Amino acid sequence: MSLFVIGLNHNTADVDVREKLSIPEYEIGNVVIQICKDNRIEACVIISTCNRTEFYYSSDNKQLAIDSFCKWFGLDYDSIKQHIYIKSKLECVQHLYKVSAGLDSMILGEAQILGQVKSSYEISKDNKALDTTTDRLFQSAFRVAKSVRSSTDIGKNPVSIANSAVNLSKQIFGDLTEQSILMIGAGSTAELLLRYLAKNNYKQLAIANRNLNNAENLAQQFQGLAFQLDFLHSKISDYDLIFTATASKEPLIDSEMIKAALQKRKHKPMVIIDIAIPRDVDKSVKKFNDVFYYEVDDLQKVISKNLQNRELAAIEAEKIIIAEAEIFMDWYKSQQHTQLIHNFQRETARIRKESLDKALNKISSGGDIEDVLFYLANNLTKKLNHTPVKAIRNAIQSGDTNKINTIKELFNIDQNNDT
């Protein structure tokens, strides 16, 4: 089996492309099951976040895996090849290590991605979509990520997309104490954002979600109000600062909703920060002068004061990743040839049993034991020598000196040795 990853991220595709090739977390289990129905694909792990969609495969057929990736999104390879990357073996291992450690994130060193990678691994594990190689690969990635964060400064003063969204809102308003805030969504990203937000004072907070129980649980945790998304149209005008982080496939906020809200607000400005992929807000809202709309890619412009230190730490982290990836590849290569050893041992065991059975039959038939032992030794030697001798003759006849030297080294022999 060969290891490789097929994917795209914030470096290779903008948000318009990424949202078309995203998979909600609740659908990932079904996707890996469908992909692994083909027996030529041994394993599949899918990581899909706002910044990346990556399929990790264990298979002998790379083209089959590429086709399955494209087929799932209903796209042909030529239409997306400029946006995707395909990394094999060592490159694949190093890439996963970098992703898990936050070195390939939009915000260098962010910690949230490790939890997302672990979640993807667990989904494949629960759906029996792992093999020995991918299981060990991801387990090693978690260990390497922990080592990077404990051995370097990459994890100091943690930042994330969620934290940057809060920082951006503070840059816009300066002070949030007079702002009414709405969080649309009640998942893990929304909770993380609210944890960062809770470090600041604000006027009031509400949480809107399709599932009211989830919204109420989060609202209770952060002393806010809760309502269902069905009431968003009538309530959105009450809020100055809106964050969105749902798994909706379609926009929840469009220009008509915002137009009505601005009329109610008498055109008092609104700030909307959309960190969902696909986006929760139709980009047509940008046409309103009183709406300040920011999406995931805009957060790249938020400057972290710790970025320079993190870049220095990343150099040390890269050294750890390169060394650890080599260790994994040593194990991987040994696994690739284990079956060859097993096949050789099985064949010699078959020859031994066949020769021994014949010798025992001769003894039971009254044959002289010393003669039978000579027979057994000669028979074993002849049969065990048959294949190697044939290979040596073929190498000599071909004149391939490299092959001849390999055989001499393999069997520890020298054609000039007369002893």
Image (spheres, rainbow, N blue to C red):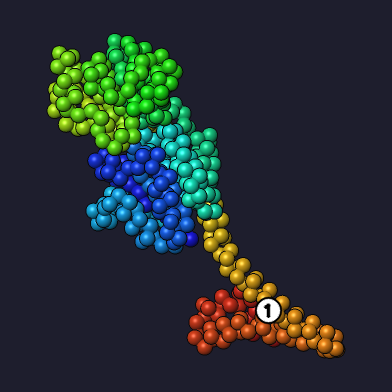
Residue at 60% over, 78% down: 408
State the image coordinates of residue 272 (x, y, percent, origin top left).
Answer: 25, 24
- Name the quadrant containing residue 250: top left
Instruction: Choose between 171 and 56: the one closer to the eye.
Output: 56
- Mark 1 residue type: Ile
Residue at 53% over, 39% down: 147
Residue at 48% over, 50% down: 129
Which quadrant of the rendered structure holds the C terminus?
bottom right
State the image coordinates of residue 18 (x, y, percent, origin top left).
Answer: 29, 42
According to the picture, the residue beneath numbered tag 1 turns out to be: 351
Residue 393 seen in render: yes
**In the depicted structure, whether residue 253 falls above or below residue 46:** above
**In the depicted structure, whether residue 407 falls above or below residue 141:** below
**In the depicted structure, whether residue 408 falls above or below residue 71:** below
Q: Is residue 93 left or right of residue 84?
A: right
- Count of marks placed on residues: 1
Q: Is residue 119 left or right of residue 248?
A: right
State the image coordinates of residue 387 (x, y, percent, origin top left).
Answer: 60, 82
Instruction: Choose between 373 and 97: the one closer to the eye.
Output: 373
Secondary element at tag 1: helix
- Name the quadrant containing residue 360: bottom right
Residue 415 seen in render: no
Residue at 30% over, 45% down: 21
State the image coordinates of residue 356 (x, y, percent, origin top left).
Answer: 75, 80
What crowding class fits label 1: few (fewer than 14 Cα within 10 Å), some (14-19), or many (20 or more)?
Answer: some
